[in-house]
Image (cartoon, rainbow, N blue to C red):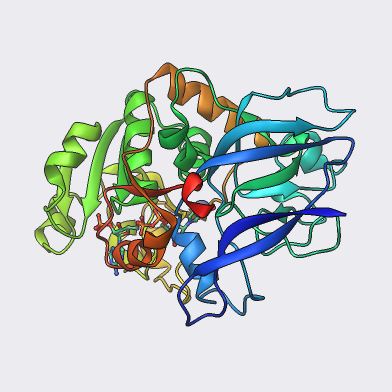
Amino acid sequence: MSTTVKAYAAPSATEPLAPATIERRDVGPRDVRIDIKFAGICHSDIHTARSEWGPTTYPIVVGHEIAGIVAEVGPEVTMFTVGDRVGVGCMVDSCGECQYCARGEEQFCVQGMTGTYAGIGKDGQPTQGGYAQSIVVTERFVVRIPDGLELDVAAPLLCAGITTYSPLHHWNAGPGKKVAIVGLGGLGHVAVKIAHAMGAEVTVLSQSLKKQEDGLRLGADAYFATADPDTFTSLASSFDLIINTVSAPVDVDAYLSLLAVDGTLVNVGAPEKPLSLNVFSLLVKRRSYAGSPIGGIRETQEMLDFCAEHGIGAEIETIPADKINEAYDRVVNSDVRYRFVIDAATFA
Ligand code: NAP
Ligand code: ZN
């Protein structure tokens, strides 16, 4: 038994996304059905829809920045009631028992967390994501969107927000810390807002100065173009923490050279090809090179509460479903200001 809902799916790696219908499982004892209102477009959706991270199983409905309203709850659900404003991010399940799940870091589940799309769901079927009218999710993977946040600007926080909040928090961004954000796209612009709200001194490193005014308005203290070689000499050895959000390969050594002693470069960007580095870039100043995947459910709720408290939402361009393919091209061309959000009413 299941429910048919309208969605937008990628039929293959090379064809445009097109209208489709998919099945959602019936609401189980601990499930909630969410009427999706808005779905953000993350660059990871594009990497997956185009098989850039390895072969994807088609057709696939991507989308893991979901904001909506609870429409139905199972009999054993305790955390939500019909009408609640909620979100779903990149995960919809995990074992719930390992040491990582126990401490609320489901992204590290030893059995592997279940992705919101391209995973295997409770019903044994491939999971399908948020470019759809509704979704059924176990309540443990649903978070509450605080009243102070509109659903449209909150949707991108479910991936872009948590993916940047988590490493900023883990590596102690705050007063007295010099933080650089590489790439002012979906993740980057939210990272600037969050790092600024945490009290850090924030620098944007973007390909050009085209978006400088925006970057400063979002909370950056300084803004430099990475196309200008002077940037790398004038900023040498100056940052405690650099968050690289770039979706394409970058010169890792060049960014490592910008770290002070004991500084850390964290890659959250996930390009399809491997990156290389010269170990001397690390050892001369005891620098670290790290990565970070999304964040746990408890931390996702903490991030949403933090954003509501500090008035942080994404800067969005809302589009109807039939503009998704155009939006994909603009994201790939770094022409996004700063997140596309699909109005889910247009899937109907
Ligand atoms: P996005 O909106 O496309 O932003 C990426 C930004 O990187 C662009 O706006 C651009 O900023 C810069 N950029 C793009 N191509 C570049 C190039 N060839 N050289 C230099 N800079 C370039 O993408 P997003 O949604 O923020 O996602 C960014 C990356 O993070 C993707 O690879 C995505 O898959 C990954 N991601 C990882 C996680 C995780 O858990 N770690 C979660 C979500 C997303 P400027 O124009 O300012 O230079
Ligand atoms: Zn994402």
Residue at left offset 17%, top offset 36% = 216
Name the one closer to the observer, 290 or 52: 52
Name the one closer to the observer, 193 or 34: 34
User: In this rendering, is residue 187 above or below 329?
Assistant: above
Q: Is residue 6 visible?
A: yes
Expressed as whole percent of the image width and height from the top left, the position of residue 7 reads 58, 58
Expressed as whole percent of the image width and height from the top left, the position of residue 52 reads 51, 76
User: In this rendering, is residue 78 above or below 107?
Assistant: above
Q: Seen from this angle, which residue lies furthest front?
A: 348
From the viewer's perspective, is 149 left or right of 92? left
Q: Is residue 269 visible?
A: no
Counting labels gives 0
Expressed as whole percent of the image width and height from the top left, the position of residue 329 reads 33, 68
Residue at left offset 37%, top offset 69% = 248
Corner quadrant of residue 12: bottom right
Corner quadrant of residue 227: bottom left
Q: Seen from this angle, which residue lies furthest bottom?
A: 14
From the viewer's perspective, is 159 left or right of 334? right
Name the one closer to the observer, 297 or 117: 117
Which quarter of the figure is the N terminus placed in?
Answer: bottom right
User: In this rendering, is residue 171 above or below 46?
Assistant: above
Corner quadrant of residue 63: bottom right
Residue at left offset 69%, top offset 61% = 22
Expressed as whole percent of the image width and height from the top left, the position of residue 188 reads 34, 47
